[in-house]
Image (tube, grey):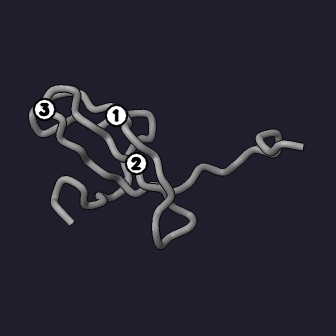
Amino acid sequence: MSAASRPKPALRDPFLLPVCDCGGPMNLATLEPHPTHPAEELKTYKCLHCGRQQVFTVQKRAAKIGDYPR
């Protein structure tokens, strides 16, 4: 696993996007289930300037009762 795709600790504030090492803004590229921890997800962010990716492991958000289909 390369350094660019190695999961990092969870973000401090879930509403703040990470900033790339080059200084460019990063956007959420993918959100996928964690392969070994069902209560966590992997969020991959991609830099808009250089294309570098950072992966963070985060806790899944609790689902609301109204989110389920009937």
The picture places residue 19, in percent across and down from the top left corner, at 22, 35
From the viewer's perspective, is residue 7 above or below residue 65? below
What residue occupies the far bottom of the structure in this picture?
A: 36
Frontmost residue, 14 versus 4: 4
From the viewer's perspective, is residue 52 above or below residue 50? below
What residue is pinned by disc 3?
A: 50
What residue is pinned by disc 2?
A: 43
> Residue at (18%, 35%) from the top-left corner?
51
Q: Is residue 62 left or right of residue 16?
A: right
Name the residue type under label 3: Cys
Secondary structure under badge 2?
strand
| Quadrant location of the C terminus in the rendered image | top right
Name the residue type under label 1: Leu
The picture places residue 44, in percent across and down from the top left corner, at 35, 46
Q: How many marks?
A: 3
Q: In the picture, residue 57 is in which quadrant?
A: bottom left
- Dot 1 or dot 3, earlier in sequence: 1
What residue is pinned by disc 1?
A: 17
Q: How many other residues sit within 10 Å of disc 3, few (<14), some (14-19) or many (≥20)?
A: some
The picture places residue 30, in percent across and down from the top left corner, at 41, 43
Q: Is residue 10 left or right of residue 23?
A: right
Frontmost residue, 31 versus 15: 31
Nearest to the eye among marks 1 and 2: give it. Answer: 2
Q: How many other residues sit within 10 Å of disc 2, few (<14), some (14-19) or many (≥20)?
A: many
> Residue at (12%, 39%) from the top-left corner?
21
- Dot 1 or dot 2, earlier in sequence: 1
Secondary structure under badge 1?
loop
From the viewer's perspective, is residue 1 above or below residue 54? below
